[in-house]
Image (cartoon, rainbow, N blue to C red):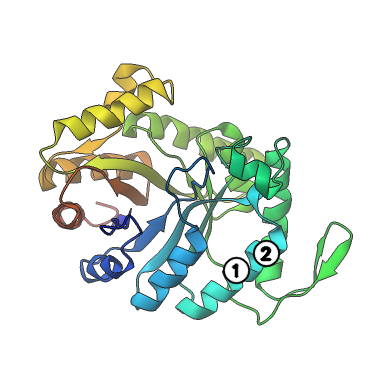
Amino acid sequence: MMRISTTLPSTRTGVPDVAMARHLEDLGYDAVGMADFIVGDGTPAFDATLVLAATATATERIGLEFGVLSLPLRPTAWVAAQMQTLQHLSGGRVILGVGIGGFPGSPFWRAAGAPLKDRGRWTDLALRALPGLIRGEPTSLGDQELTLGPAAPVPPILVGGNSEAAMRRAVLHGDGWVPSLISPEALAKKAVRLREIAGELGRPVPSISVGGHAVLSDDPAAVEAFTRVLVEIHRMPPEEAAAVPVTGGPAQVAERLHAYAEAGAGMAGLSLDGGDWMRQTEILAEARAMLPPTGE
């Protein structure tokens, strides 16, 4: 059956409502997702690792999904130490989504001393080192060899991005590939190319986890606002943008999830826009329950 995740709502003071992770756990969600979007211009944003660490203490089973962590923003050794720690604190529930980052040149990137160029190369080097560091093995980083302890299980590593470079990175260094803001039809075409890349490199085909947004309430204004962002900020053609948000009741949502599954996705992570987050989480869970078992 397709796996599902979503993000946490905000409290009245605007911080992630970690207590609501228990609601997702009770509904059978597979993971709580947390984005990494600190820009530094005053836009509200929270450290993903700290939020997921708090989520770990409030839950028992649900996965803790980075969706996705910008590796060039952080020293690789520090990322490894955090993942080791979070694996121990959570009982091995981390799902490590990673990417090259979407805001190079922003105030936060500059203040953090993150590289503005060669982000792909930085990410590749980090991905080569992270598994050994998390496993507690002696690992070289530049001219320094280090060993971190206590050793922890390496979490599933999912590589985000819709580009061919991201697909190649997922094949070479990841367990999965995470495209986002993509229709099932477009995903099916990219999944064919993913299999081709894996064949060219002689590597296993990564799993596919699709990321997106849903408005599962009667809120046309929220749908319009989201598609406007896709057109004006992401430069999508209007007809392509209109096909991205997931909308409707359980039957419609189940149809969309099934289409993603048919295109090759094994997991869908949907941020819930619009009002009534609680009801929307229930609709998504109901929709997942309507899907046929995997393989049918």
Type of amino acid under label 1: Gln
* Residue 100 appears in the figure: no
State the SS at label 1. helix
Residue drawn 54% across and 55% down? 175
Query: In the figure, 179 relative to 87: above or below?
Result: above
Query: In the figure, 238 relative to 179: above or below?
Result: above
| Crowd tier of the residue under label 1, counting other residues whose Cα lies within 10 Å: few below 14, some 14–19, many 20 or above | some
Residue drawn 46% across and 70% down? 53
| Crowd tier of the residue under label 2, counting other residues whose Cα lies within 10 Å: few below 14, some 14–19, many 20 or above | few
Does 15 sit left or right of 38 as displayed? Answer: left
Which residue is disc 1 drawn over? 82
State the SS at label 2. helix
Contact check, label 1 and label 2, Cβ < 8 Å: yes
Place of residue 195 in the rendered image (x, y in percent of width and height, measured from the top left): 52, 40
Query: In the figure, 256 relative to 234: above or below?
Result: below
Query: In the figure, 227 relative to 213: above or below?
Result: above
Instruction: Please identify the quarter of the rendering in which residue 279 is found.
Output: bottom left
> How far is mark 1 from mark 2, CA to CA?
6 Å
Which residue is disc 2 drawn over? 78
Place of residue 63 in the rendered image (x, y in percent of width and height, measured from the top left): 39, 67
Type of amino acid under label 2: Trp
